[in-house]
Image: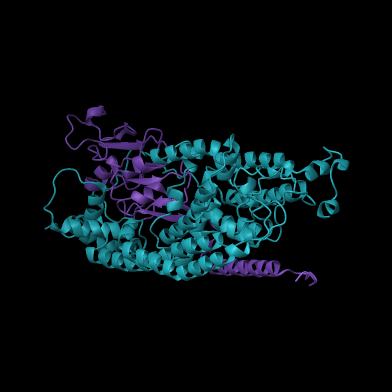
Chain colours: A cyan, B purple
Amino acid sequence: MRPEVRSPKSEVQSATAGLWSGLVWMLGPLLFFAFLSSIAIAEQRFPPPEFESGHQLPVTTTPAARALFFQYLDVVVLAVCLGVSSWLVFKRRSRNGVMALSIFSLVYFGFWRKGCVCAIGSVQNVALAVFDREYAVPVGVVAFFVLPLVFALFAGRTFCAGVCPHGALQDLVLLKPLKVPLWLEQGLSVLPYIYLGAGVLFAATGSAFIICQYDPFVPIFRMSGRTLMVLSGVALLLLGVFVGRPYCRFLCPYGALLKLGATVAKWRVRVTPDYCTQCRLCEASCPFGAMREPATGGASPQALTGDRRRLALLLALLPVLIAGGGWLGWRFGPVASKLNPTVSLAEQFVRAQGTALKFGALSPDELALERARQTPQEILTEAGRIRERFVAAATIFGMWVGLVIGVKLISLSLRRKRTDYEPDRGDCFACARCFEYCPNELVRRGMMPAANLQPAKALNE
Amino acid sequence: MDSKPEPNVSRRQFLRDGARAAALTGLGGLLGVVAGRATAKGAVWQIDPQKCVRCGNCATNCVLEQSAVKCVHSFAICGYCQLCTGYFDPEPNDLNTGAENCLCPTSAIKRTFVEDPYYEYTIDEQLCIGCAKCVEGCNRFGNGSLFLQVRHDRCVNCNECAISKVCAGDAFRRVPADQPYLLKTTIHGT
């Protein structure tokens, strides 16, 4: 049997008890004060010397943390960039402007600020702050979470366009865009919502910030990091040469939130500055698969019955998917909860109970068990409590996954009416690439005489 | 159907406006919940020296090439021992500065003679890798005046500190940015 986990300090105290017993009476009040302050230590085995040579003790240096001013500077830069980005997309309609802003954001938020603080990770801070009363979330991080979302609710994803360093990096390496097959595009587009749910699950239970841990581009901004993440970052960038913004489209959890916001945005990005001549020049302009063709919205009478039956089936399937996801979450919650440090420590303790005393160097985890300042009972109780909460949260996460898949299936079988070529509200990154494909835009910029265009009325007749 | 006049606000538009208003309200509500727990001071990572188990994870798990965690020395606690167990190997051949006698793998601890029999030990942060070998020696047999701290001139303050995830003693915590160190002090507070 392994001895009880106990603090090394208690041994120290018993060894020096005799030496201290006399002093305790004199220093009693001071010791009590030291006891209150967890940092001060009371026992010193070797009394500090009194130097006869008048030697002055050096002072322990404490280099200051980054000044608070800079934290607010980041928020101001973010707000200004969001404003500039929206202005460039909606007023100036300038791709070059958006590109210049992208480069600035990449340098400022990416390489200078090293990718931290970022809006993508802020989701987790906010989730943790909601569920953990003791976690004090910095105001700057909250601002990074809220500002792009508010902009998305009014002007679409102008944050993605040229403010997010992750988006900017991928946008700038996109050289030879290939079209992703529709089935793959639609299938992968549920991943961001699932990733978002997983990020919130692990953050809210205080287990891990997985969105930060598995961020592929921050190691590139920092020029250092875990090998696996550096490699996946490079791989994503190589993929990004051919597939437009793979992280933004198929992974980014904050992009999922922005997409939801952008679908109900007040103003939308339009290809044409005034009216669509249906010239189809912009059809293949979007490297991100966001361009939508005109559609009548109706089905042929023969297909209608089948369509309706399928929709009814999918609507009936939705609760089943949610329940199934919830069951899976409940079933696998205990396994996933091992990512929580306290739960994993408790697991190791239980495992170590049966084994004989080990000799030789201890692994870090064994050290933690040996030297933990909590009793095993405390750790086990705490781990049990965390696991219970975790399983409940995992069940909700499973239901969320079911809901996401169900809604995606339903949305695929709905018909939308569309008269013009338009970028999808949610999928459009507002990168402003498609504008210059539109002859109307060329007229607006004075690059083409207006006489070359047919007036809209003539088209309708 | 076609004869019906176009309404000023289409149904789709109305739903969209409603959803936007709901989203803004929800965001406001979330802000309200979070605002009570927000801090204007900002937060940075720090090691609680009382919880540190000297496992050595700090040296290898920081996202930086050279860990932001360094050993620091609270001189007021130090016993200025001639036989410093944070400096010398447990079984030294000789009590001199030879590398074979020293604990520190990068010889980041400088030993200088002050007066008989006292020696002063200072950390060269350029060389220190935060491996905690000296911290272990000092805590086990000495006064514990050597301990690890996150140095904020190096730390990039990741949203999730990579070392905190693997910290064996769960010693990492967020502290207010204006008091970014958890230094060991004597009972007199020096």
Q: Position of residue A114 (x, y in %)?
A: 52, 42
The answer to whether residue A351 of the structure is visible from this angle is yes
Q: Is residue A101 above or below residue B30?
A: above
Q: In this rendering, does residue A135 appear at all? A: no
Residue furthest to the front: A302
Question: Residue at horizontal 31%, vertical 51%?
Answer: B52
Q: Is residue A331 left or right of residue A268?
A: left
Q: Quadrant of the C terminus of chain A?
A: bottom right
Asked if residue A352 is positioned above or below residue B29 in the image, the reply reads: above
* Residue A224 x %, y %: 44, 37
Badge count? 0
Residue lying farthest right? Answer: A451
Q: Residue furthest top?
A: B98
Residue at left offset 68%, top offset 59% = A296
Say left or right for A153 vs B156. right
Give whichever of B65, B111 is nearer the camera: B65
Pick the residue in front: A23 or A213: A213
- Front-most of A57 and A300? A300
Q: Is residue B160 left or right of residue B78?
A: right
The N terminus of chain A, quarter of image: bottom left
Residue B73 x %, y %: 36, 43
* Percent position of residue A48, x then y: 29, 46
When the figure is inspected, residue A115 is found, relative to residue A342, above or below; the finding is above
